Every structure is written in C-alpha cells, then in structure tokens.
Image: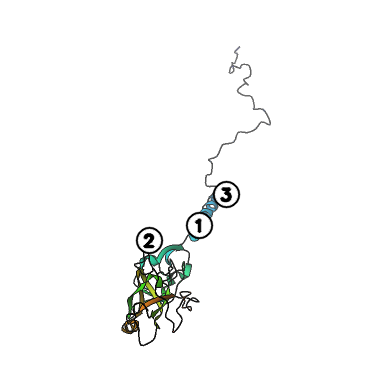
Amino acid sequence: MSVSRGAPTGPGRPPADADPAPGGPRPRRVGTPRWLDLRLVLGVLLVLGSVLVGARVLTAADATVPVWAATGDLAEGTVLAADDLVAVPVRLDDVAPAYLASSTRPEGRVLARAVRAGELLPRSALDEPTGGVQLALPVQAGFVPPSLTRGQLVDVYAVADPVTGATAAGGDVDLVVAGAPVQAVSGRGEGVLSTATTTVQVVVSVPAAEAAEVLATIGGRGLVVVVRDDVDGGAPAAGAGPAAGAAPAGPTG
C-alpha cells in the first residue's frame, strides 16, 4: 500500500491545486507613461504664444528713435549750431523719415522757418546757406535788451548821438536792419563789469548784397537793437523801438 505525498502545506498557504479566491481583482500591467499627451502639448504652446505676443507688444511700445529737437526758439534764417539742438527719444512710426535723426549733423544748415523750443526738427525746415553773410554790429550795452539771445529776430536802428555829433543825411533815426536773425551775442559784461557804455557785439544775418548798404546807412552813428515779439516775425514789442524823427538820449553810465 503506497501513500502519495503532496506539497507540504502550512498555515495560511493554500494547496498548490487550490483555485484562487473567486471574485478577487485581477492584476493589470502598468503601461509606459505618455509624456506627449495632447493636452500637455497644447498647454505649452499656449504659454509660449502668450509670452511671444507679450514680448512683441512691449517691444513695439518701446520702439522709439532719437531725433533732434530745438533747445530754444529759433527764427527763420538762423544758422544752426550744436547748442541749438538736443536729442530726444520719440515714437514716430511711419512719419519718422520726415524728421532729423540724431545720427545726422545739421550744424551749419539754415532754418527755412521758425521753430519753437522743444519742437522736433523736420527735414523740411532746413535750407542750405544761400548767399547770406553774418554782420557784426557794435552796440553799446545800454541799447541792447538784457534778454537778447541767439535765434531771436531784431530790428536795428542807427541814431544820432548828441555827444559825438554824428549825423546822417537820412535823419536822426534810420532803420538799417529789419527782421534779422541774431546769430551771436558777445562782449556782455557781468556784475560790476557791466556798464551802459560797454560795447556788445551783436551778429546778425543779412543778404550779402545788402551788407555794404547797411554799413553806409549806419554812417558812424550809434545803434539801438529792438527785439521782435516772437521768432515768427511779429512786430517789435510795444514801446521797444525809438520814435521816428526823435533822437534818444545818450547812454548813461
């Protein structure tokens, strides 16, 4: 009589031929994760698109170009100097070519029209020098307005000086220069060095063909400078000019 031996069994270990418990969960194989999920890709693209659009908007908002602007009021006929201009960054878009970029050098060009302080300098406002000359006129400080500066429009009168006795056939008062742009003012003293008899040099622009006539009309007489109201060619300030036919009193000092 033979006895068959099965696999040893112990507590909690089912026999080898025992069926698994009915109704238990079946194990599933874990799949490889899909990193290129469509929703993830779309989200990344949306974020990148938003960043690019925002950067483009900020760049466009800051798309400024430096152009020249006037540092003060300048009359027509003023020959530009470096101190007359300052570079300012502005956004001009399609009209940028109509203005002078700060990379240009307009010094020596002549203004074809008046410009105001802070005004951007358009290309159309410039002319090449055309036959004008700069005439230096010696004027006693007492007959030069204290506020006279470069770029203003002035009228210059020749007046008879009772002290020196200088006279002219034209009369005691003659207009010798009308509406001339001031190119420079020099020789003006400061403080105790400033007196009414100090000679100030006022440089104005006149047509070359008129320079000799201006000097002949002056005829050695003293000069009085009258500043116009504005650089656009307005009339002289009220009361600023000498009365016609009347010789002003000599300078005091």
Which residue appears at 56% of the width and 50% of the height? 43
- Residue that extends furthest to the top in the rendered view of this protein: 1
**Farthest-out residue, right:** 23
Is residue 37 shown left or right of residue 68? right
Camera-near label (2 vs 3) is 2
**Cα–Cα span, label 1 and label 3:** 29 Å
| Residue 89 visible in the picture | yes
The location of residue 27, given as percent across then percent down, is: 60, 33
In the rendered image, which quarter contains the N terminus? top right
Question: Where is residue 31 shown, x and y percent of the image?
Answer: 55, 39
25 horizontally vs 237: left or right = right
Tell me, for residue 39, which label it has, or none. Answer: 3
In percent of the image, x 53 and y 50: which residue is there?
44
Residue tagged by mark 1? 58
N-terminal-most mark, 2 or 1 = 1
Between 6 and 71, the one nearer to me in the picture = 71
Taking the view exactly as shown, the residue that stands out farthest to the bottom is 169
Residue 200's mark? none
State which tag comes first along the sequence, 1 or 3: 3
Question: Badge 1: few (under 14), some or many (20 or more) residues near its Cα, within 10 Å?
Answer: few
User: Above or below — where is 52 with respect to 93?
Assistant: above
Mark 2 and mark 1: Cα distance apart in space: 57 Å
- Amino acid beneath label 1: Leu
Q: Quadrant of residue 17?
A: top right
Q: Nearer the viewer, residue 116 or 195?
A: 195
- Nearest the viewer among 42 and 171 is 171
Q: Is residue 38 left or right of residue 125?
A: right
Q: x%, y% of residue 74? A: 43, 72
